[in-house]
Image: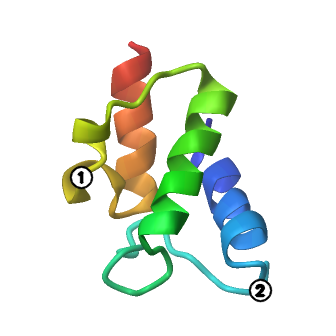
Amino acid sequence: MNIDDIRIFIQREILNDEAISIADDQDLLLSGLLDSLGVTRLVTHLEEQTGIEIPAGDVTLENFSSLALIRDYLQTRAA
């Protein structure tokens, strides 16, 4: 799954607004784009799309605060 796939899911399914611009390194949590429910929906979607189980302990700022960090996390888990 690439950054654009993640961005589009957040725009369409969580924010319901494809016009909202999300930079690869933008902090999704501190900016208010994602709240705890949004993160939960995103994690569920990522697991379904990638087949990678994401442990609750891995859902941290270090792994999920930006699109780039999410992509990097998924690549690490897939390896």
Q: Circle 2 sits on which residue?
A: 19
In the rendered image, residue 53, in percent from the top left (x then y), is placed at: 45, 23
- The image quarter containing residue 51 is top right
Q: Is residue 43 above or below residue 55?
A: below
Q: Nearer the viewer, mark 2 or mark 1?
A: 1
Q: Earlier in the sequence, mark 2 or mark 1?
A: 2
Image quadrant for the C terminus?
A: top left
In the rendered image, residue 63, in percent from the top left (x then y), is placed at: 28, 48
**Amino acid type of the residue tagged 2 in the rendering:** Ala
User: Residue visible at 40% across and 31% down?
Assistant: 54
User: Residue visible at 49% across and 54% down?
Assistant: 40
Q: Is residue 42 above or below residue 45?
A: below
Would you say 48 lies left or right of 3 here?
right
User: Residue visible at 57% across and 31% down?
Assistant: 47
CA gap, disc 2 and disc 1: 27 Å
Indicate the secondary structure of the residue bearing disc 2. Answer: loop
Residue 1 visible in rendering: yes
Q: Nearer the viewer, residue 37 or 5?
A: 37
Image quadrant for the N terminus?
A: top right
Q: Circle 1 sits on which residue?
A: 60
Indicate the secondary structure of the residue bearing disc 1. Answer: loop
User: Residue visible at 44% across and 17% down?
Assistant: 78
Residue 24 visible in rendering: no
